[in-house]
Image (tube, rainbow, N blue to C red):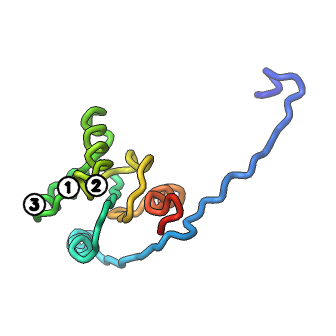
Amino acid sequence: MTSKFMTDPIRILVKRDELTLEGIKQFFVAVEREEWKFDTLCDLYDTLTITQAVIFCNTKRKVDWLTEKMRSNNFTVSSMHGDMPQKEREAIMAEFRDGATRVLITTDVWARGLDVSLVINYDLPNNRELYIHRIGRSGRFGRK
């Protein structure tokens, strides 16, 4: 295609940056059944001191379900996904940035722009790059 539009094109290959999670502490909790994940999350929520955390789900439906389930069990959480109006998402992000809310349940729509102390993958991401991108929210600026 380049030869059609260019005279003597030169191909330049650039090495892709290595994706790394160096310096980020990671833990894995083996949960054998899908229906046990919620109780495990509640145990983690009760056990850990959370300054700010993001809980990632793979679908908008799961975000809505998990948000309702957490709230019905008296957990304070906010949520965001791509089906919400932009103004609503901006307001939720502003509250999260200001610390008015400490736990955000979201899809990968959020996986940019903030640094948090804890990332929980309620659903495992579908590929390595998404995993690294999600987890990278907790290790920015040299923090672990």
**Circle 2 is placed at which residue position?**
105
Q: Secondary structure at mark 3?
A: helix
Please report the residue visible at 27 percent of the width from the left and 32 percent of the height from the top. 87
Report x, y in % for residue 39: 20, 73
Residue 70 appears left or right of 107: left
Please report the residue visible at 81 percent of the width from the left and 41 percent of the height from the top. 12
First of labels 2, 3 by sequence position: 3
**Circle 3 is placed at which residue position?**
72
First of labels 2, 1 by sequence position: 1
Is residue 35 visible from the viewing direction of this image? no
User: Observer-nearest residue: 14 or 97?
Assistant: 97
What's the CA distance linking mark 3 and mark 1? 9 Å
Residue 121 vertical position relative to residue 31 in the rendered view, above or below:
above
Q: Residues within 10 Å of mark 3 (few under 14, many from 20)?
A: few
Please report the residue visible at 28 percent of the width from the left and 54 percent of the height from the top. 104
Name the residue type under label 1: Thr
Residue 109 appears left or right of 127: left
Residue 92: assigned label: none
Contact, mark 2 vs mark 1 (Cβ under 8 Å): yes
Q: Residues within 10 Å of mark 1 (few under 14, many from 20)?
A: many
Report x, y in % for residue 25: 47, 73
Name the residue type under label 3: Ser
Q: Secondary structure at mark 1?
A: helix
Report x, y in % for residue 67: 20, 55
Residue 67: assigned label: 1
